[in-house]
Image (cartoon, rainbow, N blue to C red):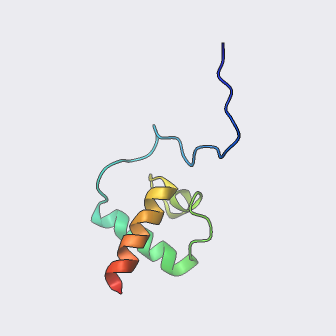
Amino acid sequence: MVKKMGKGRAPCCDKTKVKRGPWSYDEDLKLISFIQKYGHKNWRSLPNQAGLLRCGMSCRLLDGLITSDLM
């Protein structure tokens, strides 16, 4: 028997293909420079566009931390 997915969103990323754990300094710089240059209209596609192997939610949360530290 196959479980059917209920209504709702598809997963934001393939969890087996993303990097987990603390962000490196280089990843921080990539994210910050990409957001400053292009903005952040779609968190799901941002990691791929920025060349990061991270989940979109992880990028969004890190951006929130960086933004709150600057204020």
**Relative to residue 20, is residue 3 depicted above or below?**
above
Q: Is residue 11 left or right of residue 64?
A: right
Q: Residue furthest top?
A: 1
Residue at 43% across / 64% down in the picture? 61
Which quarter shows the N terminus? top right
In which quarter of the view is residue 23 placed? bottom left
The location of residue 62, given as percent across then percent down, is 39, 66
Q: Residue furthest front?
A: 6
**Relative to residue 28, is residue 51 depicted above or below?**
above
Residue at 44% across / 53% down in the picture? 54
Q: Is residue 37 visible?
A: yes
Q: Is residue 58 left or right of residue 39?
A: left
Closer to us: 25 or 68: 68
Residue at 57% across / 76% down in the picture? 38
Residue at 57% across / 72% down in the picture? 40
Closer to us: 8 or 47: 8
Which quarter shows the C terminus? bottom left
Q: Residue furthest bottom?
A: 71
Q: Is residue 30 visible?
A: no
**Relative to residue 33, is residue 13 depicted above or below?**
above
The location of residue 39, given as percent across then percent down, is 56, 76
In which quarter of the view is residue 66 placed? bottom left
